[in-house]
Structure formats: C-alpha cells, structure tokens
Amino acid sequence: MSDKPQIKLSEAVVLIDAAFLNFVITDMKATSRKLCNALCKTSTFLL
C-alpha cells in the first residue's frame, strides 16, 4: 500500500470548483477594468 494521502472525489471537485471560481473572478476584474477605462476615455471626449 502507498503512504500517499488519498483525495476523495468530493474534495477534488471542491478544489477544481474553487480554482475555476478564482479564474472567473480574476477574468471579470480584468474585463471590468478594461471596460471602465474605455468608458472613462470616451466620457472625457464627451465633456
């Protein structure tokens, strides 16, 4: 028998889900920053 700790399927799903959620949040932050910067640049032209 191996001495390595076994990861249960439910624990692996939670780890994958947390990693995916982190990716989604990071991507949303980057996208919202780009959108906000674009809106700020166009709004200065309107003033």
Image (cartoon, grey):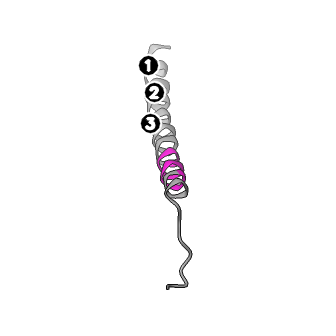
Query: Is label 2 in a helix, a strand or a loop?
Result: helix
Q: Are marks 1 and 2 in contact (CB under 8 Å)?
A: yes
Amino acid, disc 2: Lys
Query: Is label 3 in a helix, a strand or a loop?
Result: helix
Amino acid, disc 1: Phe
According to the image, label 3 marks what residue?
A: 31
Q: Is residue 33 above or below residue 3?
A: above
Specify the segment rendered in magenta: 14-22
How packed mark 1 is, by other alpha carbons closer than 10 Å (few <14, some 14-19, many 20 or more), is few
Q: Residue at x 47, y 42 (%)?
A: 24
Q: Are marks 2 and 3 in contact (CB under 8 Å)?
A: no
Q: Which mark is residue 23?
A: none
Relative to the observer, which residue lies in front, 12 or 31? Answer: 12
Q: Residue at x 45, y 14 (%)?
A: 46
Q: Is residue 18 left or right of residue 35?
A: right
Q: Which mark is residue 45?
A: 1
Relative to the observer, which residue lies in front, 19 or 1? Answer: 1
Relative to the observer, which residue lies in front, 13 or 31? Answer: 13
The residue at the far top in this view is: 46
Q: Could you tell me how far apart the alpha carbons at marks 1 and 2 are, in whole angstroms?
A: 7 Å
Amino acid, disc 3: Thr
Of tags 1 and 3, the one toward the viewer is 3
Q: Which mark is residue 41?
A: 2
